[in-house]
Image (cartoon, rainbow, N blue to C red):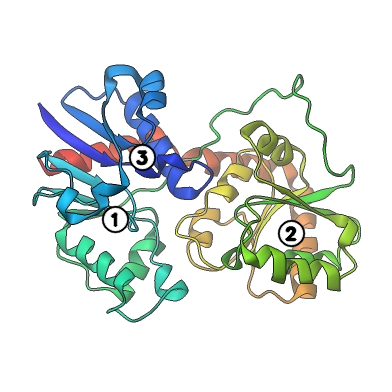
Amino acid sequence: MKTVFLESHNLKNQFNGFGQFNYHLIKGLYNANILDFKITLNAKDTGTLKNEFGDYYNYNKYTSLSRKPLFRIRKKYNVWHCMNQNIKVEPYHDIPYVLTVHDVNFIDEISSDLNHKTNQRFIEKLNRSNAITYISEFAKASTHKHFKVPNVPEYVIYNGNPISTILDLKHINIEPVTNRPYLFFIGGLTKRKNVHTLVQMLEYLPDFDLVLAGDQTDNYAKTTLANAISKTNTKNRVHCIGKINTETKQYYLQNCTAFVFPSLLEGFGIPPIEAMRFGKPVFLSNLTSLPEIGGKDAFYWDNFDAKYMAEIFTKGMQAFNKNKVDYEKAYIKRATHFNWDKAALEYAKVYRSLF
């Protein structure tokens, strides 16, 4: 039987995008009930995976030593899937290789010098690839813009929406941080997420609070974001609630007035489609992949002037409330278009093409 190796050790952190991608693709491949090839998962916590997926998968225990060339995995698989562009674990042998590119933001965030080690590592991945998958057209276009891409098959396979089922939260005790109407954001509180602009916008929206969920350990949260809060008249209306679980996330999505996401760099952008699943109006920056993901019914900011952002928000909410039923239907339809089971079947086709 043919064998496929998924370099999936980023499963260890399911609070970030790579962890979410790994887990939901693995679950989608499990739901596909594939019989013509066997998949091996590379992960640190193989026991938890085996409890969930049983013998459907084979399991290889990840060790950090395997990132070093001398200790690379030597078993020959028919296909090796490198599940994101930053992975340092590579196969020992020259075997068919699928690379998934989420983004090339490191060009802006680390160095635009192609001789920089981060870029060199990515170039090596490109050159060893037999097929390349991208999570958005933007990710594909930006890769071609900055790098020489080999002449191999390329595919755009959209991520799915992690929220396929809306939970019944009646019997779950969640204490809201505000009883006022609020705007909701979820994601890492980092420079690229640009959330301080939401605080500045809030000064022009006195009837709303702002709830920010996500990792707040980055220095940006302690400096730029904290300064924005202290310099505006919003101190008691901005609520940073840190990392939250699935139930709490759904609670805030279900009950927010709108979802706001002024991100500067997104290879895909899962949070907006999660909000759409609840029929919520979404307000996004018009940068990178977000117009591609948000579609024609989302509302977009062309710049981050606070007064302008507030005006776009106010006009967008007026349009939404005037045609609420139609907007809600359109949002839910778009959210369900992004489906992990569908994405998994497309990845399986890519694997088969290399047998």
Alpha carbon of mark 2 to alpha carbon of mark 1: how far? 44 Å
Whether residue 310 is visible to the viewer of this picture, yes or no, is no
Residue placed at 32% from the left, 68% from the top?
Answer: 143
- Residues at discs 3 and 2 in contact (Cβ within 8 Å): no
Whether residue 56 is visible to the viewer of this picture, yes or no, is yes
Give percent across and percent down for residue 263. 59, 64
Frontmost residue, 59 versus 135: 59
In the displayed structure, would residue 261 be above or below residue 6?
below
Neighbor class of circle 1 (other Cα within 10 Å; few <14, some 14-19, many 20+) is some
Q: Nearer the viewer, mark 3 or mark 1?
A: 1
Secondary structure state at the residue bearing disc 2: helix
Q: Amino acid at mark 1?
A: Lys
Residue placed at 55% from the left, 39% from the top?
Answer: 333
Residue designated by label 3: 343
Numbered badge on residue 316: 2
Q: Amino acid at mark 3?
A: Ala
Give percent across and percent down for residue 160. 45, 41
Alpha carbon of mark 3 to alpha carbon of mark 2: how far? 32 Å
Residue placed at 12% from the left, 43% from the top?
Answer: 74
Residue designated by label 1: 88
Q: Nearer the viewer, mark 2 or mark 1?
A: 1
Secondary structure state at the residue bearing disc 1: loop
